[in-house]
Image (cartoon, rainbow, N blue to C red):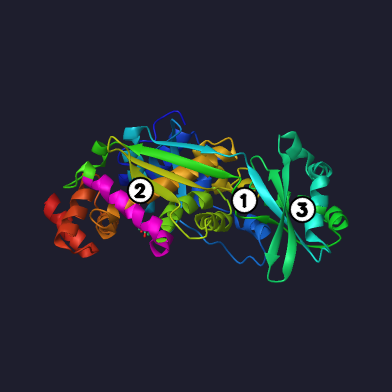
Amino acid sequence: MSKTSRIAGFYNLSLEERRQKLAALAALDEAEIEALAAGLPAEVADHMIENVVGLHSLPLGIATNFIVNGREVLVPMAIEEPSVVAGASLAAKIARAGGGFFANSDEPVMIGQIQVVDAPDPWQARVDILAEREALLAAANEVDPVLLRLGGGARGLEVRVLDSPRGPMVVIHLLYDVRDAMGANAVNTACERLAPRIEALSGGRVFLRILSNLADHRLTRARVVIPEEALAFDDFSGEAVAEGIEAAWAFAAADPYRAATHNKGIMNGVDAVVVATGNDWRAVEAGAHAYAARDGRYTSLSTWRRDGRGHLVGTLEMPMAVGIVGGATRVHPTVRTALKVLGVETAAALAQIIVSVGLAQNFAALRALATEGIQRGHMTLHARQVAIAAGARGELIDLVAEAMVERGIVRIDEARRILEERTR
Ligand code: MEV
């Protein structure tokens, strides 16, 4: 997308007008616009899972204002919770003052685990397996010639001896570069392929052969620097907002009870893009929370600190196992349109947008919590929807919504009354 992602008043447009605007900005063709409206055809759904009886839909919104690594990007988000798309868009708008979000990713290396039980000498088995490392990697590479041609394939082999409740057990980690796929299928197949050789080398019995969702070789990190002056709003100074966000983060860093909610706020943004792009949000969730507990205590996935100049610096690092090929990304028309809107050509570029949105969402939540509380924003948004339902258009939407929030009555009859007063 060459144009800006900063679309003033996008929320004031009708649904059809928004679609047309998006189509123009992202150069969508008729079929792609249709995919936004129609969603997944039932015949396609019938081939995706078992015992299909229908479809389950979610709203698909567009977060505006994002700049990620210098590129303007409109972000499709599929989510049922109000305020999330607005929160991300607001955070991204504020972040523009510092140039937006900067993100990078590790190589797309997933971990496949092979469990060996009943090895007569687990430590000897470890040595014997490692001695055959090159042959094992070559065998894993035979599984997927296409992936190999694209530059993926086996990258390494680690062997651990675990002290489990059932006694010592050998666990092999196959490190496998899956390029632009999420990678579960490729990794699981490679692990299954290695099993007979591992049994021969260890003298034990191979049991589980499965990908690990703690994809800590495939991390993505995003960073944002927000100048203090860009943080000021209403009666809150930039300094007060920066201090408040730092204090809110420190709470999450110190306390798992708060960290769970803090990280939930991050996942509001992350999951919405993961779902919109047809990726496995359970895998991303599992990886995120396991990573948040990697030091033996569950903590915040993000950090928020003020630098020497008083600017607020936010970072977020987490596993991000998402793909742009295979699975739902191939068959779901809305997913294909979402990927086109994002304009991503690699899984890493998608991961970097997702983690940036997670950081933005975290900022939006902490900014609200550390200042006016989240209910006010929720009420204002809700009031806008009620104003629109009552027939308000253009500037009248905000006028009617603000009047309702001020009066403390957010109802359609009140919206109609105010509308009548203002247009009389
Ligand atoms: C609500 O969906 C998310 C928040 O609870 C996140 C947070 O508390 O940081 C607002």
Name which residue type carries label 1. Answer: Ala
Q: Residue at x 86, y 60 (%)?
A: 203
Q: Residues within 10 Å of mark 2 (few under 14, many from 20)?
A: many
Q: Is residue 278 magenta?
A: no
The tag on residue 363 is 2
Depicted 334 relative to depicted 147: above or below: below
23 relative position to 325: left or right? left
Asked if the residue at tag 2 contacts the one at tag 1, i.e. Cβ–Cβ closer than 8 Å, the answer is no
Q: Position of residue 145 (x, y in %)?
A: 79, 39
Depicted 113 relative to depicted 306: above or below: below
Task: Return the residue at label 3.
Answer: 191
Query: Front-most of 419 and 402?
Result: 402
Q: Position of residue 201 (x, y in %)?
A: 86, 54
Query: Would residue 64 be seen by someone viewing this image from the given angle?
Result: yes
Q: Indicate which label's residue lies in the foreground, 1 or 3.
A: 3
Q: Residues within 10 Å of mark 1 (few under 14, many from 20)?
A: many
Task: Return the residue at label 1.
Answer: 328
As drawn, which residue projects farthest toward the right?
A: 200
Q: Is residue 242 magenta?
A: yes
